[in-house]
Image (cartoon, rainbow, N blue to C red):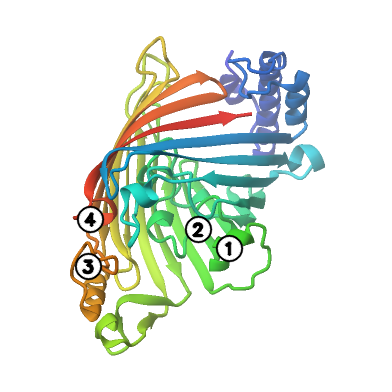
Amino acid sequence: MPYLQIFRDSAVSTPAARRKTLNLIGGFTALGLANCVQAAAAFDSQSPWMLGDWNGTRTELAQKGYDFKLDYTGEMGSNLHGGYDDDRTARYSDQFGLGTHLDLQKILGWDDAEFQLTITKRSGNNISNDRINDPRVGGFTSAQEVWGRGQTTRLTQMWYQQKFLDQKLDIKAGRFGEGEDFNSFPCDFQNLAFCGSQVGNWAGGIWYNWPVSQWALRVKYHLSPEVYAQIGAYEQNPSNLDKDNGFKLSGSGTQGTVVPVELVWTPKSNGLPGEYRAGYYYSSAKASDVYKDSNGQSAALSGEAYRSSSSKHGVWLGIQQQVSSVASDNSRGLSLFANGTMHDKKTNAIDNYVQAGLVYKGLFDARAKDDIGFAMARVHVNPAYRKNAEASNQARAVFDYDNPAYLPPQDTEYSAELYYGVHLTNWLTVRPNLQYIRHPGGVNEVDDALIGGIKVQSSF
Protein backbone atom coordinates (compact mmCIF):
# COMPACT_ATOMS: atom_id res chain seq x y z
CA MET A 1 0.00 0.00 0.00
CA PRO A 2 1.45 3.47 -0.82
CA TYR A 3 2.88 5.46 2.09
CA LEU A 4 0.37 8.29 1.52
CA GLN A 5 -2.56 5.86 1.79
CA ILE A 6 -1.16 4.37 5.00
CA PHE A 7 -0.89 7.89 6.41
CA ARG A 8 -4.46 8.80 5.44
CA ASP A 9 -6.00 5.58 6.73
CA SER A 10 -4.15 5.51 10.04
CA ALA A 11 -5.54 6.69 13.36
CA VAL A 12 -2.94 9.45 13.48
CA SER A 13 -4.87 12.64 14.13
CA THR A 14 -2.78 15.19 16.01
CA PRO A 15 -0.31 17.52 14.18
CA ALA A 16 2.61 16.27 16.29
CA ALA A 17 1.75 12.64 15.59
CA ARG A 18 1.36 13.33 11.90
CA ARG A 19 4.79 14.98 11.84
CA LYS A 20 6.35 11.95 13.56
CA THR A 21 4.67 9.67 11.03
CA LEU A 22 5.99 11.74 8.13
CA ASN A 23 9.49 11.68 9.65
CA LEU A 24 9.27 7.89 9.89
CA ILE A 25 8.18 7.68 6.24
CA GLY A 26 11.04 10.01 5.31
CA GLY A 27 13.43 7.73 7.15
CA PHE A 28 12.26 4.68 5.20
CA THR A 29 12.62 6.69 1.99
CA ALA A 30 16.16 7.77 2.91
CA LEU A 31 17.13 4.18 3.64
CA GLY A 32 15.77 3.13 0.26
CA LEU A 33 17.73 5.86 -1.48
CA ALA A 34 20.83 4.93 0.46
CA ASN A 35 20.68 1.37 -0.85
CA CYS A 36 20.47 2.75 -4.41
CA VAL A 37 23.22 5.33 -4.08
CA GLN A 38 25.56 3.88 -1.50
CA ALA A 39 27.54 1.79 -3.95
CA ALA A 40 27.97 4.66 -6.42
CA ALA A 41 31.61 5.09 -7.37
CA ALA A 42 33.21 8.24 -8.76
CA PHE A 43 31.88 9.20 -12.20
CA ASP A 44 28.92 6.82 -11.92
CA SER A 45 26.28 8.31 -14.25
CA GLN A 46 23.46 7.39 -11.83
CA SER A 47 25.07 9.08 -8.86
CA PRO A 48 24.02 12.68 -8.04
CA TRP A 49 27.71 13.47 -7.39
CA MET A 50 30.69 13.27 -9.71
CA LEU A 51 32.94 12.03 -6.92
CA GLY A 52 30.50 9.34 -5.87
CA ASP A 53 29.25 8.42 -2.42
CA TRP A 54 32.68 8.22 -0.73
CA ASN A 55 32.19 4.51 -0.01
CA GLY A 56 28.79 5.25 1.53
CA THR A 57 30.12 7.93 3.89
CA ARG A 58 28.28 10.73 2.13
CA THR A 59 24.88 9.05 2.45
CA GLU A 60 25.60 8.12 6.05
CA LEU A 61 26.44 11.73 6.90
CA ALA A 62 23.27 12.98 5.14
CA GLN A 63 21.16 10.56 7.19
CA LYS A 64 22.73 12.05 10.31
CA GLY A 65 21.91 15.61 9.13
CA TYR A 66 25.16 16.66 7.46
CA ASP A 67 24.81 17.44 3.75
CA PHE A 68 27.80 18.76 1.79
CA LYS A 69 27.80 20.24 -1.71
CA LEU A 70 30.38 21.38 -4.22
CA ASP A 71 28.72 22.71 -7.37
CA TYR A 72 30.15 24.21 -10.53
CA THR A 73 28.63 26.44 -13.21
CA GLY A 74 30.60 27.42 -16.29
CA GLU A 75 29.40 29.58 -19.19
CA MET A 76 30.97 30.34 -22.55
CA GLY A 77 29.75 33.15 -24.81
CA SER A 78 30.87 34.04 -28.34
CA ASN A 79 29.74 37.01 -30.44
CA LEU A 80 28.77 35.29 -33.68
CA HIS A 81 27.36 38.41 -35.32
CA GLY A 82 26.75 42.09 -34.61
CA GLY A 83 27.08 43.87 -31.30
CA TYR A 84 29.14 46.95 -30.47
CA ASP A 85 32.38 45.32 -31.59
CA ASP A 86 32.09 42.60 -34.26
CA ASP A 87 35.67 41.41 -33.74
CA ARG A 88 34.74 37.81 -32.95
CA THR A 89 36.03 36.11 -29.86
CA ALA A 90 34.82 33.95 -26.98
CA ARG A 91 34.77 34.49 -23.24
CA TYR A 92 34.40 32.10 -20.32
CA SER A 93 33.15 32.75 -16.80
CA ASP A 94 32.42 30.34 -13.98
CA GLN A 95 31.46 29.84 -10.37
CA PHE A 96 32.29 27.27 -7.70
CA GLY A 97 29.92 26.91 -4.77
CA LEU A 98 30.94 25.08 -1.59
CA GLY A 99 28.22 24.61 1.00
CA THR A 100 26.91 22.61 3.90
CA HIS A 101 23.35 22.16 5.09
CA LEU A 102 22.80 21.01 8.67
CA ASP A 103 19.54 19.41 9.79
CA LEU A 104 19.61 20.51 13.43
CA GLN A 105 16.67 18.29 14.31
CA LYS A 106 18.80 15.24 13.52
CA ILE A 107 22.03 16.65 14.92
CA LEU A 108 20.88 18.47 18.08
CA GLY A 109 17.26 17.44 18.47
CA TRP A 110 15.96 20.95 17.69
CA ASP A 111 12.56 20.48 16.04
CA ASP A 112 12.24 21.95 12.52
CA ALA A 113 15.58 23.79 12.66
CA GLU A 114 18.29 23.98 10.01
CA PHE A 115 21.47 25.89 9.15
CA GLN A 116 23.06 26.72 5.79
CA LEU A 117 26.57 27.91 4.98
CA THR A 118 27.74 28.58 1.40
CA ILE A 119 30.89 30.14 -0.04
CA THR A 120 31.17 30.99 -3.73
CA LYS A 121 34.03 31.92 -6.01
CA ARG A 122 33.49 33.60 -9.38
CA SER A 123 36.07 34.24 -12.08
CA GLY A 124 36.39 34.85 -15.82
CA ASN A 125 35.17 37.39 -18.37
CA ASN A 126 31.88 38.32 -20.04
CA ILE A 127 31.35 38.72 -23.79
CA SER A 128 28.67 41.34 -23.14
CA ASN A 129 30.97 43.88 -21.52
CA ASP A 130 32.86 45.14 -24.58
CA ARG A 131 31.73 43.07 -27.60
CA ILE A 132 27.94 43.23 -27.26
CA ASN A 133 27.30 46.43 -25.29
CA ASP A 134 28.64 49.93 -25.77
CA PRO A 135 31.13 50.27 -22.87
CA ARG A 136 30.24 53.95 -22.45
CA VAL A 137 26.85 53.05 -21.01
CA GLY A 138 27.01 49.29 -20.55
CA GLY A 139 24.08 46.97 -20.97
CA PHE A 140 21.11 45.58 -19.11
CA THR A 141 21.09 41.87 -19.79
CA SER A 142 24.19 39.70 -19.73
CA ALA A 143 24.92 36.83 -22.11
CA GLN A 144 26.71 35.04 -19.24
CA GLU A 145 24.62 35.37 -16.08
CA VAL A 146 27.22 33.74 -13.84
CA TRP A 147 29.52 36.72 -14.37
CA GLY A 148 29.04 39.70 -12.10
CA ARG A 149 29.09 41.27 -8.64
CA GLY A 150 32.87 41.06 -8.56
CA GLN A 151 34.91 38.10 -9.70
CA THR A 152 35.91 37.13 -6.21
CA THR A 153 35.27 34.77 -3.28
CA ARG A 154 32.22 35.53 -1.12
CA LEU A 155 30.25 34.37 1.87
CA THR A 156 26.94 33.86 0.06
CA GLN A 157 24.81 32.12 2.69
CA MET A 158 25.02 31.89 6.46
CA TRP A 159 21.55 31.50 7.92
CA TYR A 160 19.51 29.76 10.60
CA GLN A 161 15.93 28.71 9.89
CA GLN A 162 13.30 27.71 12.42
CA LYS A 163 9.69 26.61 11.93
CA PHE A 164 6.88 26.97 14.45
CA LEU A 165 3.15 26.30 14.82
CA ASP A 166 3.20 22.90 13.16
CA GLN A 167 5.48 24.34 10.42
CA LYS A 168 3.04 27.10 9.43
CA LEU A 169 5.39 29.85 10.63
CA ASP A 170 8.88 29.89 9.10
CA ILE A 171 11.58 32.34 10.24
CA LYS A 172 15.03 32.66 8.65
CA ALA A 173 17.80 34.97 9.88
CA GLY A 174 21.43 35.54 8.96
CA ARG A 175 23.18 36.51 5.76
CA PHE A 176 21.50 35.85 2.42
CA GLY A 177 20.06 37.70 -0.60
CA GLU A 178 16.52 38.78 -1.41
CA GLY A 179 16.18 36.61 -4.51
CA GLU A 180 16.68 33.46 -2.46
CA ASP A 181 13.11 33.81 -1.14
CA PHE A 182 11.42 36.75 -2.90
CA ASN A 183 10.74 37.00 -6.63
CA SER A 184 12.72 33.77 -6.97
CA PHE A 185 13.03 31.99 -10.32
CA PRO A 186 15.15 29.09 -11.69
CA CYS A 187 18.41 29.72 -13.53
CA ASP A 188 18.62 27.19 -16.36
CA PHE A 189 18.89 29.83 -19.11
CA GLN A 190 22.25 31.51 -19.66
CA ASN A 191 21.01 35.05 -20.41
CA LEU A 192 20.50 37.08 -17.25
CA ALA A 193 17.06 38.25 -18.41
CA PHE A 194 15.75 34.71 -17.87
CA CYS A 195 17.73 33.73 -14.78
CA GLY A 196 16.98 34.28 -11.12
CA SER A 197 15.19 37.11 -9.35
CA GLN A 198 14.55 39.82 -11.93
CA VAL A 199 14.05 42.67 -9.46
CA GLY A 200 17.72 42.35 -8.57
CA ASN A 201 18.65 42.70 -12.24
CA TRP A 202 16.78 45.99 -12.77
CA ALA A 203 17.04 47.54 -9.30
CA GLY A 204 20.48 46.14 -8.56
CA GLY A 205 21.64 49.21 -6.69
CA ILE A 206 19.48 48.19 -3.71
CA TRP A 207 18.42 44.55 -4.29
CA TYR A 208 21.43 42.21 -4.17
CA ASN A 209 21.02 38.79 -5.76
CA TRP A 210 23.28 35.76 -5.38
CA PRO A 211 26.23 35.60 -4.72
CA VAL A 212 26.07 38.76 -2.56
CA SER A 213 24.78 38.40 0.99
CA GLN A 214 23.69 40.87 3.64
CA TRP A 215 22.21 40.72 7.11
CA ALA A 216 18.57 39.80 6.71
CA LEU A 217 15.41 38.47 8.31
CA ARG A 218 12.57 36.68 6.51
CA VAL A 219 9.24 35.66 8.05
CA LYS A 220 6.89 33.34 6.16
CA TYR A 221 3.41 32.18 7.20
CA HIS A 222 1.36 29.50 5.47
CA LEU A 223 -2.25 30.65 5.21
CA SER A 224 -3.10 27.26 3.70
CA PRO A 225 -1.13 24.33 2.25
CA GLU A 226 -1.08 26.15 -1.11
CA VAL A 227 -0.80 29.81 -0.05
CA TYR A 228 1.80 31.66 2.00
CA ALA A 229 2.70 35.27 2.69
CA GLN A 230 6.16 36.53 3.58
CA ILE A 231 7.94 39.71 4.56
CA GLY A 232 11.62 40.46 4.86
CA ALA A 233 14.07 43.09 6.08
CA TYR A 234 17.44 43.31 4.31
CA GLU A 235 20.42 45.49 5.08
CA GLN A 236 20.97 47.93 2.20
CA ASN A 237 24.72 48.33 2.27
CA PRO A 238 26.52 49.10 -1.02
CA SER A 239 29.86 48.20 0.54
CA ASN A 240 28.76 44.54 0.44
CA LEU A 241 29.19 44.75 -3.32
CA ASP A 242 32.89 45.64 -3.08
CA LYS A 243 35.24 42.97 -4.32
CA ASP A 244 37.30 43.07 -1.13
CA ASN A 245 34.26 42.77 1.16
CA GLY A 246 33.20 39.24 0.32
CA PHE A 247 33.42 38.20 3.99
CA LYS A 248 32.47 41.50 5.61
CA LEU A 249 30.17 40.97 8.61
CA SER A 250 30.02 44.47 10.10
CA GLY A 251 27.16 46.83 9.33
CA SER A 252 29.39 49.80 8.50
CA GLY A 253 28.23 51.57 5.37
CA THR A 254 24.56 50.63 5.81
CA GLN A 255 22.27 53.22 4.22
CA GLY A 256 18.85 51.79 4.94
CA THR A 257 16.62 48.74 4.77
CA VAL A 258 14.93 46.96 1.86
CA VAL A 259 11.54 45.54 2.86
CA PRO A 260 9.96 43.09 0.37
CA VAL A 261 6.49 41.58 0.87
CA GLU A 262 5.09 38.76 -1.24
CA LEU A 263 2.07 36.51 -1.61
CA VAL A 264 2.73 33.10 -3.18
CA TRP A 265 0.19 30.55 -4.43
CA THR A 266 1.38 27.04 -5.31
CA PRO A 267 -1.62 25.17 -6.74
CA LYS A 268 -1.80 21.91 -8.65
CA SER A 269 -3.87 21.92 -11.82
CA ASN A 270 -4.80 18.35 -12.80
CA GLY A 271 -1.95 17.21 -10.62
CA LEU A 272 0.57 19.53 -12.32
CA PRO A 273 2.45 22.08 -10.17
CA GLY A 274 2.28 25.84 -10.52
CA GLU A 275 3.68 28.86 -8.71
CA TYR A 276 2.20 32.38 -8.77
CA ARG A 277 3.96 35.30 -7.08
CA ALA A 278 2.99 38.94 -6.48
CA GLY A 279 5.20 41.28 -4.47
CA TYR A 280 6.23 44.79 -3.53
CA TYR A 281 9.55 46.19 -2.29
CA TYR A 282 10.37 49.38 -0.42
CA SER A 283 13.79 50.86 0.28
CA SER A 284 14.17 53.31 3.16
CA ALA A 285 17.51 54.66 1.93
CA LYS A 286 17.78 57.95 0.11
CA ALA A 287 17.97 57.69 -3.69
CA SER A 288 18.99 60.19 -6.35
CA ASP A 289 16.64 61.38 -9.07
CA VAL A 290 17.70 60.20 -12.52
CA TYR A 291 17.02 63.57 -14.20
CA LYS A 292 15.99 66.58 -12.09
CA ASP A 293 17.72 68.83 -9.57
CA SER A 294 16.10 70.24 -6.42
CA ASN A 295 14.45 72.98 -8.49
CA GLY A 296 12.81 70.52 -10.87
CA GLN A 297 15.17 71.33 -13.73
CA SER A 298 17.60 69.13 -15.64
CA ALA A 299 20.55 68.59 -13.30
CA ALA A 300 22.85 67.91 -16.26
CA LEU A 301 22.06 71.34 -17.71
CA SER A 302 21.86 73.33 -14.50
CA GLY A 303 25.00 71.84 -12.98
CA GLU A 304 23.19 71.46 -9.66
CA ALA A 305 23.13 68.24 -7.68
CA TYR A 306 20.47 65.70 -8.53
CA ARG A 307 17.58 65.94 -6.10
CA SER A 308 17.20 63.30 -3.43
CA SER A 309 14.22 61.05 -2.84
CA SER A 310 13.49 59.64 0.61
CA SER A 311 12.76 56.13 -0.66
CA LYS A 312 12.56 53.75 -3.61
CA HIS A 313 9.94 51.15 -4.48
CA GLY A 314 8.66 48.69 -7.08
CA VAL A 315 6.41 45.68 -7.73
CA TRP A 316 6.68 42.29 -9.42
CA LEU A 317 4.59 39.42 -10.75
CA GLY A 318 5.78 35.88 -11.52
CA ILE A 319 4.02 32.87 -13.03
CA GLN A 320 5.20 29.28 -13.53
CA GLN A 321 2.80 26.51 -14.51
CA GLN A 322 3.28 23.00 -15.85
CA VAL A 323 0.53 22.44 -18.41
CA SER A 324 1.18 18.90 -19.68
CA SER A 325 2.83 15.61 -18.77
CA VAL A 326 3.87 12.48 -20.62
CA ALA A 327 1.51 9.66 -19.71
CA SER A 328 1.59 9.53 -15.91
CA ASP A 329 5.12 10.91 -15.63
CA ASN A 330 4.84 14.47 -14.27
CA SER A 331 8.61 14.91 -14.44
CA ARG A 332 8.16 15.29 -18.20
CA GLY A 333 6.03 17.79 -20.05
CA LEU A 334 5.54 21.45 -20.96
CA SER A 335 5.83 24.33 -18.48
CA LEU A 336 5.05 27.99 -19.18
CA PHE A 337 6.37 31.01 -17.32
CA ALA A 338 6.20 34.81 -17.31
CA ASN A 339 7.69 37.55 -15.15
CA GLY A 340 7.26 41.30 -14.94
CA THR A 341 8.59 44.14 -12.79
CA MET A 342 7.81 47.85 -12.46
CA HIS A 343 10.08 50.38 -10.75
CA ASP A 344 10.11 53.91 -9.38
CA LYS A 345 10.39 56.31 -12.34
CA LYS A 346 12.01 59.04 -10.27
CA THR A 347 15.03 57.05 -9.21
CA ASN A 348 15.44 53.92 -11.36
CA ALA A 349 17.01 53.64 -14.82
CA ILE A 350 14.63 50.80 -15.79
CA ASP A 351 10.93 51.53 -15.35
CA ASN A 352 9.55 48.15 -16.46
CA TYR A 353 10.53 44.70 -17.64
CA VAL A 354 8.53 41.77 -19.03
CA GLN A 355 9.55 38.22 -19.95
CA ALA A 356 7.83 35.01 -21.04
CA GLY A 357 8.89 31.57 -22.17
CA LEU A 358 8.52 27.82 -22.01
CA VAL A 359 10.46 24.73 -21.00
CA TYR A 360 9.74 21.18 -22.15
CA LYS A 361 11.31 18.34 -20.20
CA GLY A 362 11.66 14.89 -21.75
CA LEU A 363 10.77 15.78 -25.34
CA PHE A 364 12.19 12.47 -26.55
CA ASP A 365 11.55 9.09 -24.91
CA ALA A 366 15.19 8.16 -25.35
CA ARG A 367 16.23 11.42 -23.61
CA ALA A 368 13.61 11.66 -20.88
CA LYS A 369 15.70 13.92 -18.63
CA ASP A 370 16.77 16.41 -21.30
CA ASP A 371 15.03 19.79 -21.50
CA ILE A 372 14.53 22.47 -24.14
CA GLY A 373 13.73 26.10 -23.37
CA PHE A 374 12.82 29.27 -25.22
CA ALA A 375 12.18 32.74 -23.82
CA MET A 376 11.89 36.40 -24.83
CA ALA A 377 12.29 39.57 -22.74
CA ARG A 378 11.82 43.32 -23.05
CA VAL A 379 13.73 45.80 -20.88
CA HIS A 380 12.42 49.38 -21.05
CA VAL A 381 14.45 52.42 -20.01
CA ASN A 382 12.85 55.15 -17.93
CA PRO A 383 12.23 58.15 -20.29
CA ALA A 384 13.64 60.50 -17.63
CA TYR A 385 16.88 58.52 -17.58
CA ARG A 386 17.09 58.83 -21.36
CA LYS A 387 16.45 62.59 -21.15
CA ASN A 388 19.33 62.89 -18.69
CA ALA A 389 21.75 61.36 -21.22
CA GLU A 390 20.50 63.76 -23.90
CA ALA A 391 20.89 66.72 -21.54
CA SER A 392 24.42 65.60 -20.61
CA ASN A 393 25.42 65.59 -24.28
CA GLN A 394 23.80 68.99 -24.76
CA ALA A 395 25.63 70.45 -21.76
CA ARG A 396 28.97 69.32 -23.22
CA ALA A 397 28.01 70.10 -26.81
CA VAL A 398 28.74 66.52 -27.89
CA PHE A 399 26.31 65.19 -30.50
CA ASP A 400 28.29 62.69 -32.60
CA TYR A 401 27.81 59.02 -31.62
CA ASP A 402 31.39 58.25 -32.69
CA ASN A 403 32.78 60.83 -30.27
CA PRO A 404 34.27 58.96 -27.27
CA ALA A 405 32.76 61.59 -24.95
CA TYR A 406 29.23 61.01 -26.30
CA LEU A 407 26.77 59.40 -23.87
CA PRO A 408 24.40 57.26 -25.96
CA PRO A 409 20.74 57.64 -24.88
CA GLN A 410 19.19 54.26 -24.07
CA ASP A 411 15.68 53.09 -24.88
CA THR A 412 14.51 49.45 -25.15
CA GLU A 413 16.44 46.21 -25.31
CA TYR A 414 14.93 42.92 -26.50
CA SER A 415 16.44 39.51 -25.77
CA ALA A 416 15.67 35.94 -26.79
CA GLU A 417 17.29 32.61 -25.98
CA LEU A 418 16.87 29.05 -27.19
CA TYR A 419 18.69 26.23 -25.39
CA TYR A 420 18.76 22.45 -25.31
CA GLY A 421 19.83 20.84 -22.05
CA VAL A 422 21.67 17.54 -22.43
CA HIS A 423 21.40 15.53 -19.21
CA LEU A 424 24.63 13.59 -19.62
CA THR A 425 24.63 12.15 -16.10
CA ASN A 426 22.80 12.84 -12.85
CA TRP A 427 25.68 15.14 -11.92
CA LEU A 428 26.34 16.86 -15.27
CA THR A 429 24.08 18.86 -17.59
CA VAL A 430 25.32 20.79 -20.63
CA ARG A 431 23.09 23.41 -22.27
CA PRO A 432 24.23 24.81 -25.64
CA ASN A 433 22.26 27.93 -26.50
CA LEU A 434 21.69 30.71 -29.01
CA GLN A 435 20.88 34.25 -27.89
CA TYR A 436 19.62 37.16 -29.95
CA ILE A 437 19.73 40.71 -28.58
CA ARG A 438 18.07 43.60 -30.41
CA HIS A 439 19.42 47.07 -29.56
CA PRO A 440 22.01 45.84 -26.98
CA GLY A 441 21.97 48.13 -23.98
CA GLY A 442 18.98 49.90 -25.47
CA VAL A 443 21.30 51.79 -27.84
CA ASN A 444 19.75 51.98 -31.31
CA GLU A 445 23.11 52.57 -32.99
CA VAL A 446 24.48 49.21 -31.81
CA ASP A 447 23.91 46.34 -34.25
CA ASP A 448 21.65 43.50 -33.18
CA ALA A 449 23.77 40.68 -31.77
CA LEU A 450 23.75 36.90 -32.17
CA ILE A 451 25.55 35.03 -29.40
CA GLY A 452 26.46 31.37 -29.14
CA GLY A 453 26.78 29.97 -25.64
CA ILE A 454 27.32 26.80 -23.63
CA LYS A 455 26.28 26.42 -20.00
CA VAL A 456 27.71 23.62 -17.89
CA GLN A 457 26.21 22.65 -14.51
CA SER A 458 27.83 20.00 -12.39
CA SER A 459 27.77 18.70 -8.83
CA PHE A 460 30.88 17.16 -7.36
Question: Which three-letter amino acid code belongs to the residue tagged 1?
Answer: Asn
Residue 320: image x %, image y %?
Answer: 36, 38
Q: Which residue is mark 3?
A: 383
Q: Element type at marker 2?
A: loop
Residue found at the far top of this picture: 366
Q: Residues within 10 Å of mark 1 (few under 14, many from 20)?
A: many
Q: Earlier in the sequence, mark 1 or mark 3?
A: 1
The image quadrant where one finds the N terminus is top right
Marks 1 and 2, Cα distance to the nearest angstrom?
9 Å
The image quadrant where one finds the C terminus is top right
Tell me if label 2 and label 3 are in contact, CB under 8 Å: no
Tell me if label 4 and label 1 are in contact, CB under 8 Å: no
Q: Residues within 10 Å of mark 2 (few under 14, many from 20)?
A: many
Q: Earlier in the sequence, mark 1 or mark 2?
A: 2
Q: Which residue is mark 4?
A: 412
For the point 37% across and 58% down, which residue is it? Answer: 202
Marks 1 and 3, Cα distance to the nearest angstrom?
30 Å
Question: Which three-letter amino acid code belongs to the residue tagged 2?
Answer: Tyr
In-image side of 268 versus 180 (left or right): left
Residue 328: image x %, image y %?
Answer: 41, 15
Tell me if label 1 and label 2 are in contact, CB under 8 Å: yes
Marks 3 and 4, Cα distance to the nearest angstrom?
10 Å
Q: Which residue is mark 1?
A: 240
Can the viewer see residue 68 in this picture? yes
Mark 1 or 2: the one toward you: 1
Marks 4 and 2, Cα distance to the nearest angstrom?
23 Å
